[in-house]
């Protein structure tokens, strides 16, 4: 069993779930209530990596990929209500996007959440599977997204989330050279891998009739300790 701090992966939160990538506000709040009741602290992904050599019990990281509007309208008020933080990995081409198929976070919303203490990380520029791109295209996705957000929001971007969870050793080298201190994937099976700060596993969650039971099962069967 690995003594690793669990990192939870979400995409969107809404009052009613419309697809497999969206959990309900009720579901999300039930998770936060559970953490509050049992004395858990949420930490950013940057803090998580700082603790890589020391296991600290009752720590958990909450992450969101892409940059859906529901992160601000539904998840952020609940995080503030219970005194928690999270990390948002933004796809930069989704920022300020307003279409029927996708409503993205606005620049103002991102600044407000960053001021509160929400960590902002990169999820690339276009949300494409980076392994399918040329070396030049991979570098542009990784470097340009970082530069854009650092210049736009005047914050350091140190963490990266692989679009679609896909990565290889070459991508890890590019991310390291670009100045990121860590990168995150998603692992849907049983975790037996040792710590890798450029391929940290996350537990992808979904809507279910018993969200807490499902979360506890995923944490235990993936080799994580909370206590």
Image: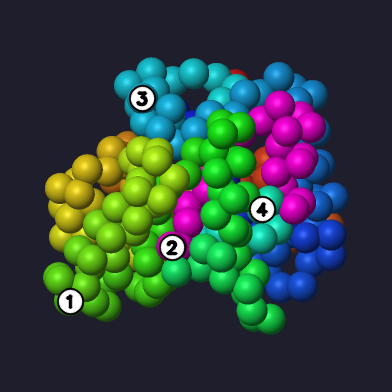
- Which percent across, then down, holds residue 202? 49, 48
Write down the residue under mark 2: 92
Separation of marks 3 and 1 at Cα, in angstroms: 32 Å
Comparing 121 with 55, the one in front is: 121
Graded by Cα atoms within 10 Å as few (under 14), some (14 to 19) or many (20 or more), the crowding at tag 2 reads: many
Q: Is residue 153 above or below residue 161?
A: above
Q: Which mark is residue 50?
A: 3
**Which secondary structure lies at badge 4?**
helix
Sequence-first disc among 1 and 2: 2
Write down the residue under mark 1: 134
Q: Is residue 119 above or below residue 123?
A: above
Graded by Cα atoms within 10 Å as few (under 14), some (14 to 19) or many (20 or more), the crowding at tag 1 reads: few
| Disc nearest the viewer among 4 and 1 | 4
Q: Residue furthest bottom?
A: 100
Comparing 209 with 182, the one in front is: 182
Query: Does the magenta segment cover residue 83?
Result: yes
Q: Which residues are magenta?
A: 73-92
Task: Give the residue displayed 76% in from the left and 51% down from the top.
Answer: 74
Sequence-first disc among 4 and 1: 4
Sequence-first disc among 2 and 4: 4
């Amino acid at each position: 069993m690995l003594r690793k701090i669990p990192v939870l992966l979400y995409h969107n939160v809404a009052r009613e779930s419309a697809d497999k990538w969206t959990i309900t506000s009720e579901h999300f709040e039930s998770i936060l209530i559970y953490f509050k009741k049992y004395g858990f602290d949420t930490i950013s992904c940057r803090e998580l990596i700082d603790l890589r050599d020391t296991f600290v019990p009752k720590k958990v990281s909450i992450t969101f990929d892409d940059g859906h509007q529901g992160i601000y309208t539904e998840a952020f008020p609940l995080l503030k209500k219970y005194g928690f933080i999270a990390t948002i990995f933004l796809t930069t081409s989704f920022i300020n996007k307003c279409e029927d198929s996708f409503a993205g976070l606005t620049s103002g919303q991102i600044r407000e959440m960053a001021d509160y203490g929400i960590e902002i990380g990169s999820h690339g520029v276009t949300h494409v599977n980076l392994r399918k791109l040329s070396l030049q295209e991979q570098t542009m996705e990784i470097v340009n997204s970082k530069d854009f957000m650092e210049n736009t929001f005047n914050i350091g971007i140190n963490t990266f989330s692989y679009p679609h969870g896909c990565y290889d050793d070459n991508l890890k080298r590019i991310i390291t050279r670009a100045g990121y201190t860590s990168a995150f994937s998603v692992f849907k099976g049983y975790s037996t891998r040792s710590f890798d700060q450029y391929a940290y596993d996350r537990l992808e969650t979904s809507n279910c009739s018993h969200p807490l039971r499902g979360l506890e099962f995923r944490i235990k069967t993936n080799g994580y300790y909370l206590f």
